Image: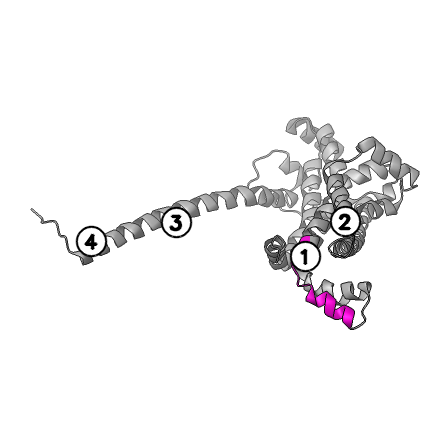
Amino acid sequence: MTEKTNNPKDLYYAARRQTQIGNIIFDTIIYLVLAFVVVATVYPFWNTIAISFNDGLDSLKGGIKLWPRKFTWKNYQDLFVTPRIFNAGIISVTRTIIQTVLSVFCTSMLAYALSRKEFVIRKPLTTILVISMYVNAGLIPGYMLIKKLGLLNKYAVYIIPCLVDIFNFILVRTYINGLPDSFVESARIDGANEFKIFIRIIMPLIVPSIAMICLFTAVNAWNSWFDTYLYCSGKPKLHSLQYVLMSFLQQSQNQSSSAADAGSMAVAASGGSTAAKSTPISIRSSITMIATLPILVVYPFVQKYFVVGMTIGGVKE
């Protein structure tokens, strides 16, 4: 028989071994769960890439997982030679850049103005703005307002209604409230006006929050299609890339009630040819990749500002 030891040193090492085993089991479970989340998140995106590089007729058969069965550039070639896609891409890029720059500047300037304690009516104005974020007039009054302003089928409808974002305004104002008042007071003593204080003092100090709302604004502008559907659907030259993607999605649903029927239609249209041919599902996957790629490229460069802005922006000095 083994004798039980009461040696404190042995008890310590035994407890330590049990703790290490428990930590290893816990870490293993956590890593397995995270691995499952990564696979569940990445697989749909990777599958879309595989379909976009696969022959359209072959894609209708299904069964494509991680790699294309019949690799082809045909889907992307058909997209880039289509004037509608090229024009929609220009509209999406330009509206994203212009809307991001103007919206971030106007929102930040409004946040600075309503963060000044000497501005007497800052609290009532802030309350009105916050209420407007939760309660709005609705779709029909909004459409009538856009129509009265003469913005229907105009490029300006992408920019003017989005000059100020209330959610971003709250984030930036909270960040500015956390800055010491001594910066503004010293600038005023040196004779700087409010606009110069905002440009030269405040803007450099709130770069993390600006980068954060730049990301929010750019993603919303790039992914937006409903405003095109409401206000610019009658003018194809102003269709955005996301609206064209939505149109292709509807087209694929209408034309491909089943994979067999779609395959028969595609083969019949090609005269029985087995050459690489684009189909709604392959074109849809290709447009999805084109629409997603810019965000994937930009996000890693602003991620650090995004994290810092979300952390510090919620802390008040």
Counting residues from the start of the chain, the first of labels 2 and 1 encountered is 2
Judge by depth and name the residue closer to the eye, 103 or 286.
Answer: 103
Q: Nearer the viewer, residue 2 or 185?
A: 185
Magenta-span inclusion, residue 188: yes
Circle 3 residue:
27
Q: Amino acid at mark 1?
A: Asn
- Amino acid carrying label 4: it is Leu
**For residue 56, side relative to residue 36 (left or right):** right
Amino acid type at circle 2 is Phe
> Does 117 sit above or below residue 84?
below
Q: Which residues are magenta?
A: 174-189
Disc 3 to disc 1, how far (Cα)?
40 Å
Q: Amino acid at mark 3?
A: Asp
Proximity of marks 3 and 4: CB atoms separated by less than 8 Å: no
Q: Are marks 4 and 2 in contact (CB under 8 Å)?
A: no
Residue located beneath label 4 in the image: 11
Q: Nearer the viewer, mark 1 or mark 4?
A: 1
Residue 271 seen in render: no
Kindly identify which numbered label has been placed on residue 189: none
Cα gap from disc 2 to disc 1, whole angstroms: 48 Å
Report the predominant secondary structure element of the magenta stretch: helix
Q: Between label 2 and label 1, give the one nearer the viewer.
A: 1
Label 2 crowding class (10 Å Cα cut-off): few <14, some 14-19, many 20+?
Answer: few
Q: Tell me, for residue 177, which label it has, or none.
A: 1
Q: Circle 4 sits in a helix, a strand or a loop, which is it?
A: helix
Of callouts 1 and 4, the N-terminal one:
4
Near mark 1 (Cα within 10 A), the count class, few <14, some 14-19 or many ≥20, is many
Residue 145 rendering spot, x and y as whole percentages: 88, 37
Which badge, 3 or 4, comes first in the chain's sequence?
4
- Left or right of residue 240: residue 13: left
Name the residue beneath numbered marker 2: 80
